[in-house]
Image: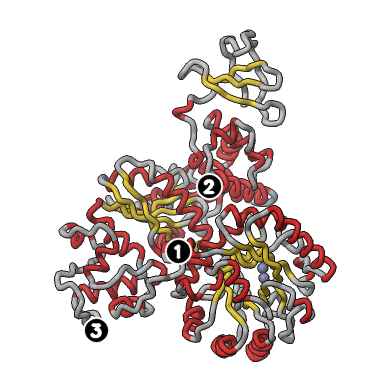
């Protein structure tokens, strides 16, 4: 940024400052900006030299916030992507930067002014200087340069298949087209066929393509749960700044904690629904409005996420939240019950039950439905947690009073299970992991680094293991959280575990996982796991079916047979909270429950930050209807150790 000319003013030291004209870079100054005369200008003070330079920068009121800055970074990324070639790599860096900025928990101004941008993961020097420039001046020189290279509206228009950059430029030059809507209008008015390079056929084709594009925008790819949650949190934070908005709740498959999310659904409780929708439409990262009504809309964000918002007045909120949360099958089942056509009649049912309509606004208006629990109560059943709303027997169980009311919760978990350290492929030391677990209120942590067969993940050899145990003893002196000696032992191809028996017996806990030869046929794989589960030591079956969401399907094996064996063996099953694994799946958890098998909810953490995976693990457990008593790491330290002790 260039420092503008300004009147000299006195610094705190009393020395008159001189005019400067040089660029501010984060490396040469430790800068603090402070407002001198309100509304007039800002002064940048070089703390090390105790001199001061004057800067005309945007007054604080009109500064870009983190979302607006992220939106610019996204736009830069999109334009770099269009340029292609080497710029693709830069595009990715800007994309990451946009995500980091939009997700910042602290005030972006503080981070910029305290020169801490580059200390954030994913932000390098070049990106930091763009963010700094955006924050201080409201503009980006990089974006200015890029925009000159392309016709306006290029990002939206390039989403139409078959429309090259040069064609978009021609359309812009001839007709001033800058959006898909304008393109559609021009095609419908027959204006395109006359342009050189476009004929009548192309015009018809273009209209078809646009129709298809709208359809695709509605059904585009699903977001991974973890990403969806990040994006939803940002938008909820933004929406909560709207006037007269009491609450913005996450609904849809994200609230039901499905592995992937098609549309991020949000429901606002507001006295002024239309105002909230308007506020939402000003969210800087929106690139396309897919559908818009007065009290609801669906948009697409620059990063690709589809987001819908229903703005509901307070009396309508509960019903709107219920219907938006779904699943459709669950809501339909409730509707049938409300209509009196839903399966078995329930004698306890309130005769005055209101019908649940979709969208269920009018029904709610006349009744005092404060929250979802009131709706379930009217239907004669207890509140059904969102994670269970799949019409997989939960409504019937609720009507019969058989719904588990003590589903495991995050607060129930007492110990972090399945943690890696620098001994194998983890990022943090034993002490760092232990302290982080302690800070999260845990009573114990199990250190389970990889075993030697997992050489690519730095599997721990016997020598290293001895050293690790000594280090655990040392760290234990310094922390309250109990550190348990564990391993994530590979289940090798023939089903044996990876350390000799006399070593295995010395662990406090063994997680047994498959990390290789995923493509074995079903019979072999089943035999391999059955052999492992029948080993005499107690073990926890780690990330059971080896799936990686959206990347690798679960491997083939006879799960029911394996569950039968586990029920007879000294073993438990892990629910892995790594958001890419979320293994085992809820349907299998329910099968295992029938056999009275016990579980642990693990984090499979490779860093202190990943201890936050716990929430995903708990969500998956709840989707599998797991009760607190079925989860071993809800036990206190002594009871847990006893329950998982190998021998
Ligand atoms: Zn593993
Ligand atoms: Zn692991």
Front disc: 1 or 3: 3
* CB under 8 Å between discs 1 and 2: no
Does residue 346 appear to the left or right of 613 in the view shown?
Answer: left
Instruction: Name the image quarter holding the N terminus.
Output: top right
Give the structural element (helix, strand or loop) at label 2: loop
Instruction: Name the image quarter holding the C terminus.
Output: bottom right
Where residue 433 appears, x then y in whole percent? 66, 56
Q: Mark 3 points at which residue?
A: 344
Does residue 44 appear to the left or right of 621 in the view shown?
Answer: right
Where residue 316 appears, x then y in whole percent? 24, 56
In whole angstroms, how far apart are the C-alphas of marks 1 and 2? 21 Å
Looking at marks 1 and 3 on the same chain, the residue that comes earlier in the sequence is marked by 1
Q: Nearer the viewer, residue 323 or 184?
A: 323
User: Badge 2, how many Cα within 10 Å: few under 14, some, many 20+?
Assistant: some
Mark 3 residue CB less than 8 A from any atom of ligand 1: no
Residue 136 picture quarter: top right
Q: Mark 1 points at which residue?
A: 262
* CB under 8 Å between discs 1 and 3: no
Q: Which of 558 and 62 is in front in this view?
A: 558
Where residue 372 appears, x then y in whole percent? 29, 62
What residue appears at the point 59 percent right and 86 percent down from the top-left corner?
566
What residue appears at the point 29 percent right and 64 percent down from the top-left corner?
373
**In which of the image's four quarters is ligand 2 placed?**
bottom right
Looking at marks 1 and 2 on the same chain, the residue that comes earlier in the sequence is marked by 2
Does residue 56 appear to the left or right of 429 in the view shown?
Answer: left
């Amino acid at each position: 940024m260039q420092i503008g000319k300004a009147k000299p003013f006195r610094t705190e030291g009393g020395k008159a400052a001189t005019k400067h004209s040089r660029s501010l870079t984060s490396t040469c100054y430790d800068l603090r900006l402070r407002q001198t005369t309100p509304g007039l200008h800002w002064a940048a003070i070089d703390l090390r030299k105790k001199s001061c330079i004057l800067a005309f920068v945007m007054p604080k009121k009109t500064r870009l916030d983190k979302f607006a800055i992220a939106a610019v970074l996204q736009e830069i990324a999109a334009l770099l992507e269009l340029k292609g070639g080497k710029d693709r790599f830069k595009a990715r860096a800007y994309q990451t930067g946009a995500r980091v900025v939009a997700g910042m928990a602290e005030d972006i101004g503080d981070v910029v002014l305290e020169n801490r941008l580059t200390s954030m993961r994913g932000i390098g020097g070049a990106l930091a200087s763009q963010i700094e420039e955006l924050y201080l001046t409201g503009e980006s020189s990089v974006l200015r340069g890029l925009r000159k290279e392309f016709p306006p509206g290029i990002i939206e228009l390039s989403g139409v298949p078959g429309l090259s950059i040069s064609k978009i430029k021609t359309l812009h030059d001839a007709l001033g087209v800058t959006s898909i809507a304008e393109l559609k209008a021009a095609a419908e008015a027959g204006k395109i066929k006359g342009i050189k390079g476009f004929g009548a056929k192309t015009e018809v084709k273009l209209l078809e393509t646009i129709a298809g594009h709208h359809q695709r925008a509605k059904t585009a790819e699903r977001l991974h749960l973890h990403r969806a949650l990040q994006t939803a949190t940002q938008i909820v934070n933004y929406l909560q700044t709207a006037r007269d908005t009491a609450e913005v709740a996450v609904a849809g498959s994200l609230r039901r904690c499905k592995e992937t999310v098609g549309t991020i659904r949000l429901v606002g409780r507001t006295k002024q629904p239309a105002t909230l929708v308007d506020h939402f439409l000003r969210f800087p990262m929106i690139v396309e409005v897919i559908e818009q009504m007065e009290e609801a809309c669906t948009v697409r964000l620059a990063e690709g996420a589809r987001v819908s918002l229903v703005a509901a007045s307070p009396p309508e909120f509960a019903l709107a939240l219920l219907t938006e949360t779904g699943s459709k099958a669950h809501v339909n089942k409730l509707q049938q019950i409300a209509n009196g056509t839903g399966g078995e009649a329930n004698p306890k049912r309130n005769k005055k039950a209101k019908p649940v309509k979709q969208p269920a606004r009018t029904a709610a208006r006349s009744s005092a439905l404060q929250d979802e629990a009131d709706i379930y109560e009217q239907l004669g059943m207890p509140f059904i947690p969102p994670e269970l709303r799949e019409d997989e027997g939960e409504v019937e169980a609720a009507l019969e009073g058989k719904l588990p009311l003590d589903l495991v919760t995050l607060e129930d978990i007492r110990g972090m299970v399945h943690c890696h350290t620098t001994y194998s492929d983890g990022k943090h030391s034993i002490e760092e992991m232990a302290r982080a677990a302690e800070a999260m209120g845990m009573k114990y942590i199990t250190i389970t680094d990889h075993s030697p067969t997992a050489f690519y993940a730095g599997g721990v050899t016997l020598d290293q293991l001895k050293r690790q145990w000594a280090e655990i003893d040392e760290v234990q002196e310094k922390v309250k959280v109990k550190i348990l000696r564990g391993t994530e032992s590979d289940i090798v191809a023939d089903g044996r575990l990876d350390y000799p028996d006399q070593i295995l017996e010395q662990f406090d806990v063994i997680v047994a996982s498959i990390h290789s030869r995923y493509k074995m046929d079903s019979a072999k794989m089943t035999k391999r796991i059955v052999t492992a589960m029948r080993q005499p030591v107690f073990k926890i079956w780690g990330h059971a079916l080896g799936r990686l969401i959206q990347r690798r399907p679960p491997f083939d094996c006879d799960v029911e047979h394996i569950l039968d064996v586990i029920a007879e063996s000294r073993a438990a099953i892990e629910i892995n909270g790594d958001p890419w694994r979320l293994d085992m799946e809820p349907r299998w958890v329910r099968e295992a429950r029938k056999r009275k098998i016990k579980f642990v909810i693990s984090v499979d953490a490779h860093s202190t930050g990943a201890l936050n995976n716990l929430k995903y693990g708990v969500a998956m457990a709840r989707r599998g209807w797991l009760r607190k008593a079925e989860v071993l790491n809800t036990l206190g330290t002594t009871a847990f150790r006893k329950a998982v002790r190998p021998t």
